[in-house]
Structures are given as C-alpha cells and as structure tokens.
C-alpha cells in the first residue's frame, strides 16, 4: 500500500460518516453506504430468472471452491453487488464493505469467466488492489476512533459484535492492527 493510505482510509471513513450524519465512531451499515454511493445490493434471491437449481447451487456454503462470497458487476456507470446470503450477516457485512471499497478506490473490475463445472474464475488477481480493499473495508466497519471509544466504554466483545455487525475475527484483527490493543494494556 502506498505511504499515507491507511491515514487516508481513516479520513475517508470519518468524512463518509459525517456526510451520512453519523457520529465518527458510529457503526456504518454497508447497505446505507452502498445507497449513498448509488450502488445496488442484491442476493441470489433478487436475481430475476434464476432457476431454483441454479439458486441452490449459488447458495451452497460448504467450503468447496464453488462457494463464493460476493461479486460486483459494473456496466457503464451502474454497479451491482451480489452477496452470498448463505453466509453469516457479519461475513456479508465484511464482503459488502470489501466490494464497496473496490468501487470507492475506483479499482478496475477484473474479468470473470465460468468454468465448465460452473465455477466463477477471475482472469487476473491484483494483490495490491485486494490489500487496499481489505484495509479500507476494515476501517469502514471499525475505524480506529471507534475502537478507542469501544475500549474507553469497556464494551464486551459481544456488545461490539452486535453493535457493529462484525465478526470476532474482524474485531480482533482491527484492534490488533491499529495498535489499540497495545494502547489499552
């Protein structure tokens, strides 16, 4: 990541919350952000014309290579994110923020193909873009200021996970990577 990128993410997160009339430390719902950005969010249930068999295949959540998290479709100026609704709400929140982060950063969408077995395959993988989207999505979900406030208030993990709609893994990662764990030892 470029020098200053992490600080930019924190500023962007705070500015976005301000635009949405949210406190800087408030949870940010990904669907609200998507609406703010003019991006539609669907699940396979919303896709017209899918047969029950295809929908069932898309919603399989068994850890096999055909199990997917989210896909973003860009046609002209229109963007649609389709989430795998068989995943937990916390996972969907993380996946949605990740996909929105790609659009916020104006990353060029990767081309996708479908294998004979029906697997969605990316034609290329841009590690830097994925790292940028990972970091920004984490900041949008749990900005450093929110993590500091969480620690000051003495919230339990369960309270944080419920209020912010994130997984324990995301919360632990963000608290560690931002230095908040060290700060509040």
Image: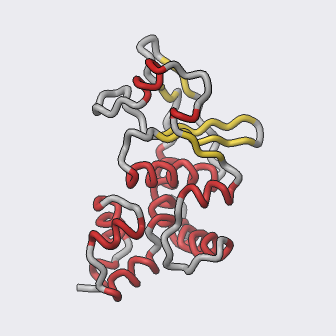
Colour pattern: secondary structure
Rendered location of residue 160, percent (x, y): 34, 71
Examine the rendering and report whether any part of residue 119 can be seen: yes
Question: Residue 42 or 144: which is nearer the viewer?
Answer: 42
Residue 170 percent across, percent down from the top left = 35, 60
Where does residue 95 sit, x and y in percent of width and height? 46, 48
Q: Is residue 91 left or right of residue 100?
A: left
* Residue sticking out furthest to the right: 76
Note whether 177 is above or below 155 in the view shown.
above
Which residue is drawn at the image coordinates 34% and 79% (left, top)? 180
Q: Quadrant of residue 35?
A: bottom right
Q: Residue at x 48, y 66 (%)?
A: 139
Identify the residue at horizontal 54%, vertical 79% (top origin): 24
Image position, residue 39 (x, y; %)? 66, 49
Residue 128 visible, this angle? no
State which quadrant residue 94 falls in. Answer: bottom left
Question: How many discs appear?
Answer: 0
User: Quarter holding the C terminus?
Assistant: bottom left
Closer to us: 41 or 125: 41
Task: Name the quadrant containing residue 67.
Answer: top left
Judge left or right: residue 21 versus residue 151. right
Q: Residue at x 52, y 38 (%)?
A: 43
Q: Residue furthest bottom?
A: 152
- Return the residue nearer the eye: 48 or 34: 48
Residue lying farthest to the left in this orientation: 185
In the displayed structure, 163 sits above or below 131; it is below
Taking the image as shown, residue 154 lies to the left or right of residue 2, namely left
């Amino acid at each position: 990541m470029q020098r200053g990128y992490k600080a930019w993410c924190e500023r962007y997160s705070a500015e976005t919350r301000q635009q949405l009339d949210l406190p800087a430390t408030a949870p940010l719902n990904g669907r609200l952000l998507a609406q703010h950005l003019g991006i539609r969010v669907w699940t396979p249930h919303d896709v017209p014309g899918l047969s029950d068999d295809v929908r069932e295949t898309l919603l399989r959540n068994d850890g096999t290579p055909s199990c997917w998290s989210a896909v973003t479709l860009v046609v002209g100026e229109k963007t649609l994110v389709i989430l795998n609704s068989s995943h937990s709400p916390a996972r969907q929140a993380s996946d949605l923020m990740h996909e929105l982060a790609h659009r916020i950063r104006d990353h060029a969408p990767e081309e996708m193909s479908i294998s004979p077995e029906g697997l969605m395959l990316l034609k290329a993988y841009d590690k830097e873009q994925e790292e940028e989207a990972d970091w920004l999505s984490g900041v949008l979900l749990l900005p450093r200021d929110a993590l500091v406030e969480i620690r000051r208030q003495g919230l339990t993990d369960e309270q944080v996970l419920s209020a912010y709609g994130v997984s324990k893994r995301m919360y632990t990662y963000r608290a560690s990577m931002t230095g908040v764990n060290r700060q509040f030892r």
